[in-house]
Image (cartoon, rainbow, N blue to C red):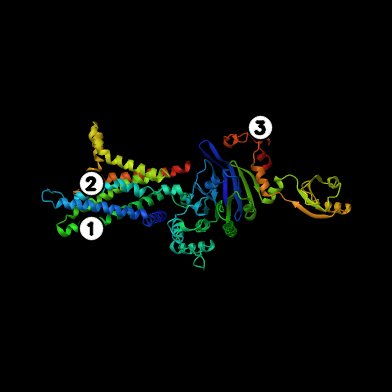
Amino acid sequence: MIEAQNLTRRYGDFTAVQDVSFSLAAGEIVGMLGPNGAGKTTTIRMITGFLPPTSGRVTVAGKDLLDAPHAARRQLGYLPEKVALYNEMRVEEYLAYRARLEGLGRAEAREAIGEAMERCLLTNVDPKLDVRRQIIGTLSKGYQQRVGLATAILHQPSVLVLDEPTVGLDPKQIIAIRELIRELGRERTLLLSTHILPEVELLCNRVMIIDRGRIVAEGTPESLRETQVGNPAVRILLKDAPAGAGEALGAVPGVVSARAGAATGSDAAWVIEHEKGTDLREAIFREAVERGWVLLEMIRERASLEDIFVRLTTHDVAAGSAEEPAASEEAPAADETPAEPSEETAS
Amino acid sequence: MRALWATYTRELRAYFLSPLAYIVLFFFLVVNGAIFVFLILNLIDPRVMVQDPALFYFFRFSWLMLLLLVPVLTMRLISEELRSGSIEILMTAPITESQVVAGKYLAAFTFYASLWLPTLVYGILIARQSEVDWGPVAAGYLGILGIGAFLLAVGTFASATTRSQLVAAMVSVSLVLLLFLLAWFAERVDNEVLKQALSYADLFAHIDEFARGIVDTRRLTYYGTGVLFFLFLATRALEDKKWR
């Protein structure tokens, strides 16, 4: 539904986004992750047609954003990072204005507004919670966000683009908005940018990690875990810290290393790293039984997206290339440092 | 067309929903009322010889309010959208920059024209006491609307260049003032062609003409061209924002 080809955007000498390509199939919910300033918003603005790319192409639902901007924009609903509405208008009035802007007819508009308000929970049987007639400037941030979402879905777009939809909301509002996003994503293609990791795990079936204007990793949260993280590990807790456990565990076939973990009381924790593609839980269990250890806990250690994210977007001096990472922030287009740690692990 | 209409109605509504509109309307009427009273006091003074129609003097003075009205009415038109960021939702809708500019400009003009509406009362008041020649009055209003249309386009352009309303106001005051003063330069230049050109642009002379009932299409063409030119610049200024 969205096809982005070799998008590059420069602001003067600064390259905010460089050669980014991706595509979203119909019905997908894709999360765009990245630290602040990584180029997420710039990328999104190029996809929504707010910013023209310095080079590259975008098509939305088969319509080229440059050749047929209006047709492409009609297919697209957009919630910007900063939801700026017209504060002096009432919710209903604002939506009516947006409907007219989108070219909806009178009857069509009335229906669309009713539905959008209903879906975004702007209506309520309790008149206190019904904000249809309320002036936008007097609404809380969460409600304004909902009005923004209602605006985005008003014209029944097939693609929704949401830029940090939960930023600045309180936890309760965040949950409500996420629920709403999940609901909206059922029948639409959805691109979501965020720097909140659990959000991606919760909502998305595919993730793109953007850093310094490039896509450094892409895949399902699952596949990212597998490709990005070193060896899988199992964490066990043994009662009364049996002697010689370290050597015994290290000798189990397939084990790469066994490290002592943080112990609780008199019990001993071990983190057993093993080769990829193997499952050693049974072997570890049998080893424990054979030696008469009491196995209190056994947990498969799962790398969180957080780990992957930190790994991909941290640029410490020790890692890899001799180039100082601070300087490469402004690295020009002809960047010839494929030795960047992030690049290596990307594919 | 629908998008333009949507922008126009929203903008017009924004005028009437803001306190600014009523403050402007109030002071506009206070000043115009003062001018009118002053005018009447002078006209009934037997020592003053009057040849021109009574309202001639009214147009002659009150149009000067444009110098203040234009920046106040236009400064927030586009600047506010740029500052708040609502421009982002606006420009990702199926609408072009020129539709946005035109819609907003037309709303400003409509509001401006509606400011003058209550002043029609002055004509009626005079008509109750003496004969009024309505031709020059109509021409006077035409002049007021024409010059207003022109200068409001200048203000719209100023508003499209910046996200600060204050800067927009200052730019439009300066530009409008320059246009006011063109005629003064006409007296100072030697070049005959330039002198001629500048005196054509003499807004003071224009309004005097109109108020005497002379409708010269060259003046109207001047305003029309000015409107198109400055709205074109405003559109380009708005488009340019994308590239930075």
Give percent across and percent down for residue A330.
Answer: 57, 36
Q: Marks 1 and 2: which is nearer the front?
A: 1
Q: Secondary structure at mark 3?
A: loop
Is disc 3 in the same subunit as disc 2?
no
Tell me the residue that label 1 is attached to.
B121
Q: Residue at x 19, y 51 (%)?
A: B39
Give percent across and percent down for residue B161.
Answer: 41, 43
Q: CA distance from mark 3 to mark 2?
A: 74 Å
Q: Secondary structure at mark 1?
A: helix
Q: Amino acid at mark 3?
A: Ala
Q: Quadrant of residue A213?
A: top right
Marks 3/2 in contact by CB < 8 Å: the verdict is no
Question: Can you see residue A342?
Answer: yes
Q: Amino acid at mark 2?
A: Ile
Q: 10 Å neighbourhood of mark 1: few (<14), some, or many (≥20)? A: few
Q: 10 Å neighbourhood of mark 3: few (<14), some, or many (≥20)? A: few
Q: CA distance from mark 1 to mark 3?
A: 81 Å
Q: 10 Å neighbourhood of mark 2: few (<14), some, or many (≥20)? A: many
Q: Which sits in the foreground, A281 or A7?
A: A281
Q: Which sits in the foreground, B128 or B231?
A: B128
Q: Secondary structure at mark 2?
A: helix
Q: Which mark is residue B207?
A: 2
Tell me the residue that label 3 is attached to.
A322
